[in-house]
């Protein structure tokens, strides 16, 4: 895994290996002895993803290089490639990038000589979010194979929907989609069902917000909750063991009734917690692959964590 750009690049065995390592890091302190610099290059707003990476980096003992596009040379016309190359040149060992382009990595591929991790690519991919969602589901059920999972919301504009639907399918889940008219993505070859069908048959209800910033025109959200969202009435029809996920930020009272955000079914804040450990595991994997951290030390850390 030279770069971490898509979950699709991983084998099923590699996915589970990362989840196993992330789970182990929850209980085992893992600190690198050598000084490493990680650059967080975010061209779009972020709270959970960016802060989660920063916490993960600090837990590993890395020096964090922060970047704010509004006060950077991007304002002067600097390209993504030149920004990334600058951080590489001044000594960064790792680049974490979020960019509004669906295919921003193509600008960097084979031109950057340090590992790159995708923290969000337009409407196309959000692989680290996908991995933490997989971890949360696996924690709950012990297996993903055979589970019924519905992804509900603005499918058309969501990078989370695309990453998760494809990964869940590969791991053996039955994937369904549910969307308001105009929010469907016909490129995703999964059955669409109504939210009322979804709550009755699914083990996992994964909600998405309306991605207003990606719509050409402001999307209408009046009555969205009653027509397409998770109301308290619909929640009562869910299976006893079924859980609620949401990548956040949450539009309370739009895709989900605000009282359900922290209800007993909700694993929304557990997802956020898991994000730290998943991102630690992913960073350790790519650093090891590049030989930036010592192979023997890495195995030592992983063995200690897994055997705890």
Image (cartoon, rainbow, N blue to C red):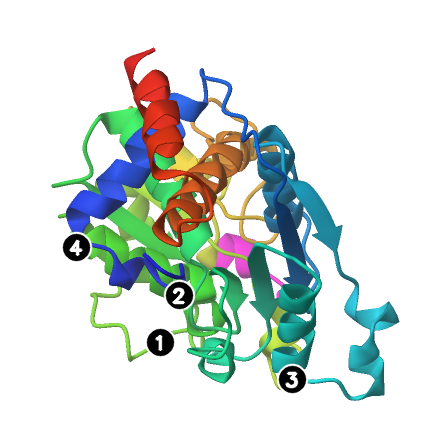
Q: Residue at point 48% right, 73% down? A: 123
Residue 48 placement: quadrant: top right
> Is residue 266 or residue 113 the one in the foreground?
113
The residues bearing labels 4 and 1 have C-alpha atoms spaced at a distance of 19 Å
Q: Secondary structure at mark 2?
A: loop
> Is residue 204 or residue 308 the one in the foreground?
308
Nearer to us of marks 3 and 4 is 4
Quadrant placement of the N terminus: bottom left
Q: Which mark is residue 224?
A: none
Q: Is residue 86 magenta?
A: no
Q: Which residue in the protein does label 4 denote?
A: 170
Q: Is there any visible trace of residue 251 in the rendered image? A: no
Q: Secondary structure at mark 1?
A: loop
Residue span colored magenta: 221-227
Label 1 crowd (10 A; few <14 / some 14-19 / many >=20): some
Dots 4 and 1: beta carbons under 8 Å? no
Residue 128 image offset from top left, x and y in percent: 44, 51
Q: Which residue in the protein does label 1 denote?
A: 185
47 up-or-down from 162: above or below: above
For marks 4 and 2, the one nearer the N-term is 4
156 up-or-down from 198: above or below: below
Dots 4 and 2: beta carbons under 8 Å? no
Residue 67 placement: quadrant: bottom right
Nearer to us of marks 4 and 2 is 4
Dots 2 and 1: beta carbons under 8 Å? yes
Residue 288 image offset from top left, x and y in percent: 38, 45
The residues bearing labels 2 and 3 have C-alpha atoms spaced at a distance of 18 Å
């Amino acid at each position: 895994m030279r770069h971490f750009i898509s979950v699709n690049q991983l084998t099923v065995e590699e996915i589970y290996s990362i989840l196993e390592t992330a789970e182990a890091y929850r209980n085992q302190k893992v600190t690198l002895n050598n000084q490493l610099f990680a650059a967080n290059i975010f061209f779009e707003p972020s709270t959970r993803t960016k802060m989660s990476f920063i916490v993960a980096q600090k837990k590993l003992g890395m020096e964090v290089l922060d970047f704010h596009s509004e006060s950077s040379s991007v304002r002067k016309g600097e390209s993504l490639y030149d920004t990334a190359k600058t951080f590489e040149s001044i000594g960064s060992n790792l680049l974490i990038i979020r960019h509004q382009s669906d295919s921003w990595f193509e600008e960097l591929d084979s031109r950057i000589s340090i590992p790159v991790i995708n923290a969000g690519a337009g409407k196309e991919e959000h692989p680290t979010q996908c991995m933490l969602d997989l971890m949360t589901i696996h924690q709950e059920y012990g297996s993903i194979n055979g589970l019924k999972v519905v992804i509900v919301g603005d499918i058309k504009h969501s990078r989370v929907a695309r990453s998760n639907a494809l990964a869940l399918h590969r791991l053996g889940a039955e994937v369904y989609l549910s969307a308001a008219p105009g929010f469907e993505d016909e490129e995703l070859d999964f059955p669409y069902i109504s939210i009322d069908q979804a709550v009755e048959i699914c083990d996992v209800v994964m909600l998405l917000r309306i991605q207003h910033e990606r719509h050409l025109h402001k999307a209408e959200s009046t009555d969205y909750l009653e027509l397409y969202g998770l109301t308290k009435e619909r929640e009562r029809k869910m299976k006893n063991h079924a859980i609620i996920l949401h990548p956040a930020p949450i539009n309370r009272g739009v895709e989900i009734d605000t009282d359900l955000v922290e209800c007993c079914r909700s694993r929304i804040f557990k997802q956020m917690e898991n994000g730290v450990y998943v991102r630690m595991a992913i960073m350790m994997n790519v650093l090891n692959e590049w030989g930036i951290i010592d192979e023997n030390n890495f195995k030592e850390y992983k063995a200690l964590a897994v055997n705890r």
